[in-house]
């Protein structure tokens, strides 16, 4: 949670990490980064061996005592610690990428080791206080030890060396931008016991290996070593910036213990207020969110859209599947007028689509929604949870692609959900005698624009409890689509959730993806018949 506050404060302009860098002297003779020891052979197999060996012994937490001069930094003082651009890794090598480092301090108290890999040989990059301009931070460089370590790093691409295309900072968190140069939600290497009754565990990347790219290559390979009380792991990232920023990821996990809820390819996002959830609509901006829904493409070929909600209490949903084809937290709504935010630019926030490689077997896509009153809190998490619980001594191998950008690389041929709106139910102009809640779901795309005026379109609605009433489906010419409307009447005074499903069909054939929703009826005292 605190990490998000820092990332937002580091962001500037379009929301990338423009802060924290200073140009440094203009002369070309800037000293190169210091390397420690002699080059050592390195490849992914060796890294997996290291992780396996680590998992065979008890976890040892790294010391978290920062030097006195780094203690007590606030946001402003931490931001005054700026990496010198002319000291960037590969700054003088005429390559497509450069790497700059984050300093420790504030929330980032765990040291991270950095290595450069050249021709299959690795050498550690030494921490050096001279890499940073401490400005008005109050930090005294002379009081910092030579073995302090780094907090993380950012990657810059040759097309724009002022704005970064990706950043790895804090635990196993990382983010990337697409063609809009806008940061939004985050990904993680792994999630453990997220949304479970037990405390969540946050594995962290303890070391990174940055492979020097070949001249002219637009791909960068990064390796990471993970450690936590429950698991050790090895990761390989191959990143390719672009309009859709693609990351090829291989993960090898070695559990130390049985893990109750393992989260593969987790995405972490924020949803405070949207068109379907106006509970906290006290801001002048109509909508505030990094993502507005969870999209899934099941192993059976069904496309599912689940709008996000800012709940009043923690909510956990599990969507069973076998060999999923893809899933992710999406920002479908890209209309500036719906946000009216000229600072955070939520209309430009990238979606994150997870594309599994190979068969992942049985399990579920799991969604955790946490209440928030503030947009600086990441309160949405989605991940894949394998059916079989990991056991100590096992090797778990996962490969997948992450796509960061406006649209996922695949889309249903069916019509998709454009918006979900809710409000008090009941027929217009008639005095209400009981409480019901209305849903209006708009669909567009697919074959909807081709339907003739005499085509019969049905809204197929199912509910786990209660009575579905006043169902209709009618053309919505403004979007060349259809609007489905229905009311749900709770069966009793319970506030237990009601699971809803909806799709449109004609002549027995589906026209749309499947819309799913979890509705929590209000308490009886809050079921007003004349106001919300």
Image (cartoon, rainbow, N blue to C red):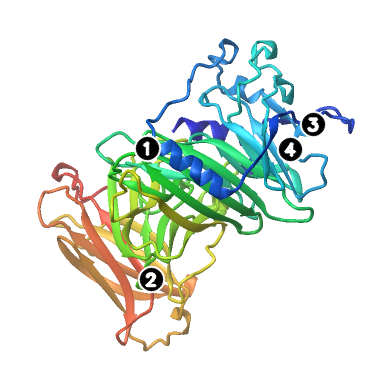
- Relative side of 415 to 430, left or right: right
User: In the rendered view, would you say 510 is above or below 366?
Assistant: below
Residue linked to disc 3: 32
Q: Quadrant of residue 378?
A: top left
Q: Which class describes the residues within 10 Å of circle 3: few (<14), some (14-19), or many (20+)?
A: some
Q: Residues within 10 Å of mark 2 (few under 14, many from 20)?
A: many
Residue 316 coordinates in the image, percent (x, y): 28, 48
Secondary structure under tag 2 reads loop
Q: Look at 66% across and 23% down and name the residue there.
A: 81
Counting residues from the start of the chain, the first of labels 3 and 1 encountered is: 3
Question: In the rendering, at what x and y percent does residue 52 appear?
Answer: 44, 42
Under circle 1, the secondary element is loop
- Horizontal relation, residue 522 to residue 187: left or right: left
Marks 3 and 1: which is nearer the front?
3
**Real-space Cα separation, disc 2 to disc 3, in angstroms:** 54 Å
Q: Residue 372 — which label?
A: 1
Tag 4, which secondary structure?
Answer: loop
Label at residue 89: 4
Q: Which residue is mark 2?
A: 513
The answer to whether 71 is drawn above or below residue 169 in the figure is above
Q: Is residue 441 above or below residue 507?
A: above
Tell me which numbered mark, 4 or 1, is placed earlier along the sequence: 4
* Above/below status of 106 relative to 424: above
Tell me which residue sits at (37%, 33%) in the image.
Answer: 229
How busy is the neighbourhood of tag 4: few (under 14 within 10 Å), some, or many (20 plus)?
A: many
Residue 71 screen position, x and y as percent: 54, 14
- At horizontal 67% and vertical 25% (from top left) the residue drawn is 127
Q: How far is the residue under mark 3 from the one under mark 1?
A: 45 Å
Q: Nearer the viewer, mark 4 or mark 2?
A: 4
Which circle's residue, 3 or 4, is located before the other in the chain?
3
Is 17 on the left-hand or right-hand side of 381?
right
Which quarter of the picture shows residue 525? top left
């Amino acid at each position: 949670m605190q990490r998000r506050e820092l990332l937002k404060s580091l962001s500037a302009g379009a929301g990338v990490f423009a802060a924290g860098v200073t140009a440094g002297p203009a002369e070309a003779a800037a000293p190169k980064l210091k390397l420690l020891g002699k080059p050592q052979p390195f490849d992914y197999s060796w890294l997996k061996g290291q992780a396996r060996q680590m998992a065979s012994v008890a976890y040892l937490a790294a010391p978290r005592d920062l030097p006195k001069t780094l203690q007590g930094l606030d946001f402003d003082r931490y931001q005054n610690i700026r990496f010198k651009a002319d000291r960037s890794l590969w700054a003088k090598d005429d390559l497509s990428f450069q790497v700059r480092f984050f300093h420790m301090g504030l929330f980032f108290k765990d040291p991270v080791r950095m290595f450069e890999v050249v021709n299959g040989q690795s050498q550690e990059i030494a921490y050096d206080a001279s890499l940073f301009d401490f400005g008005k931070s109050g930090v005294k460089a002379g009081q910092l030890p030579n073995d302090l370590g780094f907090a993380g790093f950012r990657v810059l691409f040759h097309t724009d060396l002022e704005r970064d295309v990706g950043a790895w900072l804090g635990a196993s968190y990382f983010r990337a931008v697409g063609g809009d140069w806008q940061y939004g939600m985050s990904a993680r290497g792994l999630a453990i016991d997220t949304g479970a009754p037990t405390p969540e565990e946050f594995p962290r990347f303890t070391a990174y290996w940055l492979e020097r790219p070949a001249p002219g290559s637009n791909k960068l390979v990064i390796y990471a070593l993970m450690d936590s009380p429950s698991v050790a792991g090895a990761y390989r990232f191959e990143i390719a910036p672009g309009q859709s920023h693609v990351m090829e990821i291989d993960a090898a996990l070695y559990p130390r213990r049985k893990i109750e809820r393992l989260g593969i390819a987790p995405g972490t996002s924020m949803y405070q207020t949207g068109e379907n959830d106006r509970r906290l609509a006290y801001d002048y901006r109509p909508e505030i969110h990094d993502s507005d829904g969870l999209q899934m493409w099941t192993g059976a070929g069904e496309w599912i859209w689940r709008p996000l909600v800012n709940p009043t209490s923690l909510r956990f949903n599990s969507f069973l599947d076998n060999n999923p084809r893809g899933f992710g937290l999406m920002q479908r709504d890209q209309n500036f007028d719906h946000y009216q935010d000229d600072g955070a630019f939520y209309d430009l926030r990238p979606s994150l689509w997870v594309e599994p490689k190979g068969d992942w077997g049985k399990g579920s896509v799991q969604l955790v929604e946490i209440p928030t009153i503030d947009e600086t809190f990441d309160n949405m998490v989605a991940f894949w949870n394998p059916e079989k619980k990991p056991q100590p001594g096992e090797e778990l191998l996962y490969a997948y692609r992450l796509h960061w950008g406006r649209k996922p690389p695949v889309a249903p041929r069916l019509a998709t959900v454009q918006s979900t709106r809710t409000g008090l139910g009941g027929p217009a102009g008639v005095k209400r005698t009981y409480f019901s809640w209305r849903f209006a779901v708009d669909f567009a795309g697919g074959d909807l624009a081709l339907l003739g005026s005499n085509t019969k379109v049905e809204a197929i609605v199912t509910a786990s409890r209660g009575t579905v009433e006043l169902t209709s489906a009618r053309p919505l010419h403004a979007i060349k689509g259809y609007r489905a409307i229905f009311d749900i009447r709770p069966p009793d005074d319970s506030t237990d959730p009601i699971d809803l499903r909806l799709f449109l069909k004609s002549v027995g054939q589906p026209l749309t993806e499947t819309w799913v929703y979890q509705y929590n009826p209000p308490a009886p005292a809050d079921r007003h018949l004349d106001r919300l």
